[in-house]
Image: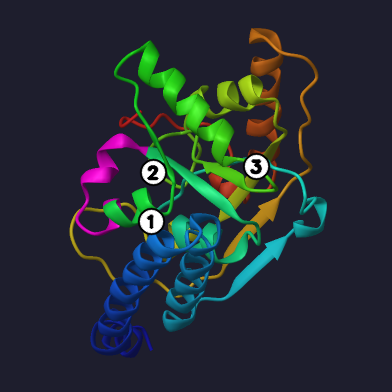
Amino acid sequence: MKILYRLYQLFIALPLGLIVTVLTCLIIIIGSLLGSAHFWGYYPGKIWAQIICRLLLLPIEVVGREKIDKKQSYVFVANHQGPMDIFLVYGYLGRNFKWMMKKALRKTPLIGYTCEKARHIFVDKSGPKKIQETIENARQTLQGGTSLVVFPEGSRSFTGHMGKFRKGAFQLADDIGLPVVPVTIDGSFDVLTRMAGFNFVNHHKMRLVIHDPIFPNGHGPEVLKETMEKSYEAIMSALPERHQGYVENKDQ
């Protein structure tokens, strides 16, 4: 079965996935230029992510979606197990959101331009002025229920375990006054581990667990630290025993 699944990926899922990806990028670019990036920057990407997961025949489970208020903007923070996290969150979180991503990703052919037109938020840490511009851009974007998704580890895991959190997403939530929602990603590491070059996908269930929102209780370093700790503990709590505990990530 493993050989058949790999042949299916190589000759059916991969070609169709590439076609769908290019078409989705074009739809997002044209739609965002002619219409609203609020709509076109999210829904085509959501459908694309679901198509990719279905093409790969991956079972998906989502827990806790009922905890989210559709009219409220949030900062969603998730662990980063691997490349498939993008498809799981984009396709199945069920909320209109923008990604917060590294500035360097803007240079990725086609994908970078698509993300720019969709008004995803690129983080520029080149100086205090640029950081403030990023915060102001996020403040203007996160209106009317639009949320933000961040991987606070800043790098994919090599082991499936969690690394340390960076405070950028939590600082942004503190500055803007938005609640933080911890999200656990489980199974993504088993589907596609972090390795160089082309790799086949393994057939394994992916699970998305949405935890209770952490609403702001004031501002400042102590509140920020408490929110980070609560988020880390919540995300860790829904991971299987084999991925429990902190493991240093050399890329952080």
Examine the rendered structure and indicate whether residue 141 appears above or below residue 178: below
Which secondary structure type mostly characterizes the magenta part of the structure? helix
Task: Report the disc number at residue 83.
Answer: 1
Q: Secondary structure at mark 3?
A: loop
What residue lies at 46% left-to-right and 49% top-to-bottom?
81
What residue lies at 33% left-to-right and 83% top-to-bottom?
13
Amino acid type of disc 2? Answer: Arg
Which of the two residues, 47 or 156, is positioned nearer the viewer here?
A: 47
Q: Is residue 201 visible?
A: no
Q: Which residue is mark 3?
A: 143
Q: Which residue is mark 2?
A: 156
Amino acid type of disc 1? Answer: Pro
Examine the rendered structure and indicate whether residue 130 appears above or below residue 251: above
Numbered range of the magenta stretch: 102-112
Q: Secondary structure at mark 1?
A: loop
The image shows residue 61 at horizontal and vertical percentages of 65, 68
